[in-house]
Amino acid sequence: MTPRPTRPGWTHERALQAAGALRIAGVDEVGRGPLAGPVVAAAVILPVGARIRGLRDSKQLTPAQREALAQTITRRALGIAVAHADAGEIDRLNILRAAMLAMRRALAAIDPAPDAVIVDGPVSPDCPWPTACVVDGDALCMSVAAASVIAKVVRDAWMVRLDAEYPGYGFAQHKGYGTDEHHNALRALGPCPEHRRRFLSAVEQRPLVFADEGSDLSPLPPLQQVERG
């Protein structure tokens, strides 16, 4: 297995620049795996070749490093946008579709609009610009690494706010992931509105019953129907 690079570079951005793209947006999302909270996507346009010391995949950074880098990225970026899909949308669409929806929302909101897009991973969010899908893009591409940092900082702050709104689950500590603490809280308190019901059903291997039994957890429609809607 080829090891992941320790520092991203500008190779993919420069290739798109050579093809005529002036503004290249890196796009990444955070929050596919948790049992609760939104999936958050960020789109970031950096000046190609900009030097941002210490920038790398957000998973390789401490919270303090991410916070400092987010401030630097915000100052240096030509454009930044952040968007999300909430727990209800994740249940309705499934996590992959919801992540693509969050990416499309971020790209639709970024100003100025990009000329090309680099997405972390093998799947395109179906945007109107030329798109390069790069596996391990957050480790390879500076613009995608920047997006990963912004998305992570925003989502972590969101989960801290949810911790105050729904005390007892430990959201501020585990950020919605399935830790022992989180599972113990679920057994004691049951799920809150920010929990992803399909995720919990999969974890428990059985249907869950909720107080607001109005939610439609019927089989998912085809992808093209979801996207047209």
Image (tube, rainbow, N blue to C red):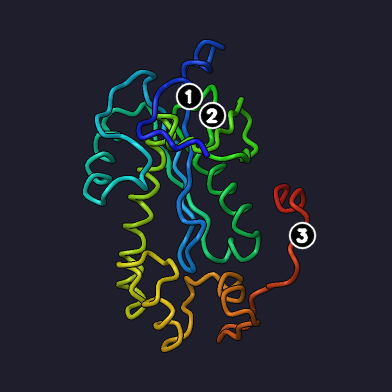
Q: Secondary structure at mark 1?
A: strand
Instruction: Name above or below for residue 114 compared with residue 144.
Output: above
> Which mark identifies residue 24?
1
Question: In the image, what residue type sits under mark 1?
Answer: Ile
Horizontal side, residue 142 vs residue 67: left or right: right
Q: Residues within 10 Å of mark 2 (few under 14, many from 20)?
A: many
Vertical order, 128 against 16 (above or below): below
Mark 3 or mark 1, earlier in chain: 1
Q: Nearer the viewer, residue 54 or 147?
A: 54
Q: Single out the residue that lies furthest toward the front.
A: 1
The span from disc 2 to disc 1 (Cα, nearest Å) is 5 Å
Query: Circle 3 — which element?
Result: loop
Quarter holding residue 45: top left
Name which quarter of the figure residue 209 lies in: bottom right
Residue type at mark 2: give it. Val
Q: CA distance from mark 2 to mark 3?
A: 28 Å
Residue located beneath label 3 in the image: 221
Crowding at label 1, few (<14), some or many (≥20) Cα neighbours within 10 Å? many
Q: Amino acid at mark 3?
A: Pro
Residue underneath mark 2: 117
| Element under disc 2 | strand
**How far apart are the two marked residues, 3 and 1, measured between alpha carbons?**
33 Å
Give the mark nearest the N terminus, 2 or 3: 2
Question: Residue at left 37%, top 21%?
Answer: 47
- In the rendered image, the vertical position of residue 98 relative to residue 147, given as above or below: below
Q: CB under 8 Å between callouts 2 and 1?
A: yes
Tell me the tag on residue 90: none
Does 200 appear above or below 134? below
Q: Nearer the viewer, residue 13 or 215?
A: 13
Q: Position of residue 26 (x, y in %)?
A: 47, 32
Q: Please state the horizontal and vertical placement of residue 4, each as a whole percent of the image.
A: 44, 37
Image point 58% across, 61% down: which residue?
90
